Amino acid sequence: MLLERASGLAEKISQYQKLKGTADEAQQFHTRADQFGTVAERIANTRRALERLASAGVAISFVPSDGMGLAAKAKTLRAAIRDNPAAVKDPPFDLRYDFTDRITGIAAAAEKSMTDAWKAYVAKRADFGPNDVLSALAEVPQFRPSVDKILHCRTNITALGNSLPTDPQATVVRLDTLIAEHDTAWATISAEDIPRSVISFIRAAASDGAPLTAYTDEVQTWLESRHLINSFRIRLR
């Protein structure tokens, strides 16, 4: 009886060890699957983000480092696992340092390039120059409502450029709208009791620059009387 029990116990121990080994092996496969899945999802999301930016007209200068080499490693690993699934436990190269970490690094570099490209795109579209003229005009009560609207547009435009949008095309449309509102606010800036020559000079100076002929005696007198003369500069092209 005792011998039979010992034999049965030995068999149970053997089964347990086999089950435990199978469970350990399954856990290793599960860990690798999670590892590959996380990396694959990130690189796929990065690729889609690059495509969305390009479709929105945002130029991106990005070339993945050793992309061909990593693609070759992926093919080698896939072939090894296809021939022998156990190869996932003993891959032909260091999975972390030679593969997954480097793919993650490519995604991180692409994300930085996209962010930089987007910020440069917004900055170029919204190159309004310094706020000196606006700051000066804000001191004139008649101009303050228009100045407030212009500054509001600039603030919203700056906010758009602070981070990479999830929907670049929709954000570009929003950017177009804000720039149009900004330009309209400048084009329509006016005040009933301010000479038309002054209004014309200010509009031109705030956009692409006013010609020297627009700086008449009337304009100079008006600017001097309100201590705004130092807010304007002569620019040679």
Image (cartoon, rainbow, N blue to C red):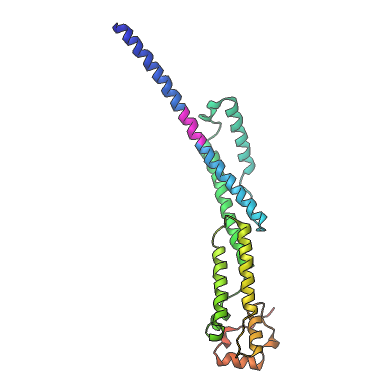
Name, please, the residue furthest toward the front: 192
Q: Is 16 placed left or right of 91 in the picture? A: left
What range is drawn magenta here?
Answer: 26-33
Q: Residue at x 58, y 47 (%)?
A: 45
Q: Residue at x 47, y 27 (%)?
A: 25
Q: Residue at x 56, y 87 (%)?
A: 228
Q: What secondary structure predominates along the stretch shown in magenta? A: helix
Quarter of the image where one finds residue 54: bottom right
Q: Is 197 placed left or right of 159 in the picture? A: right
> Where is the C terminus found, in terms of image quarters?
bottom right
Q: Residue at x 55, y 74 (%)?
A: 151
**Nearer to me, 178 or 75:** 178
- Tell me residue 194's x, y (percent): 61, 90
- Tell me residue 140's x, y (percent): 54, 86
Image position of 90 with respect to 51: above or below: above
- Tell me residue 202's x, y (percent): 63, 83
Quarter of the image where one finds residue 9: top left
Quarter of the image where one finds residue 173: bottom right
- Please say whether residue 31 is one of the residues in the magenta stretch: yes
> Where is the N terminus found, in terms of image quarters?
top left
How many numbered circles are shown? 0
- Please say whether residue 76 is one of the residues in the magenta stretch: no
Q: Is 235 placed left or right of 28 in the picture? A: right
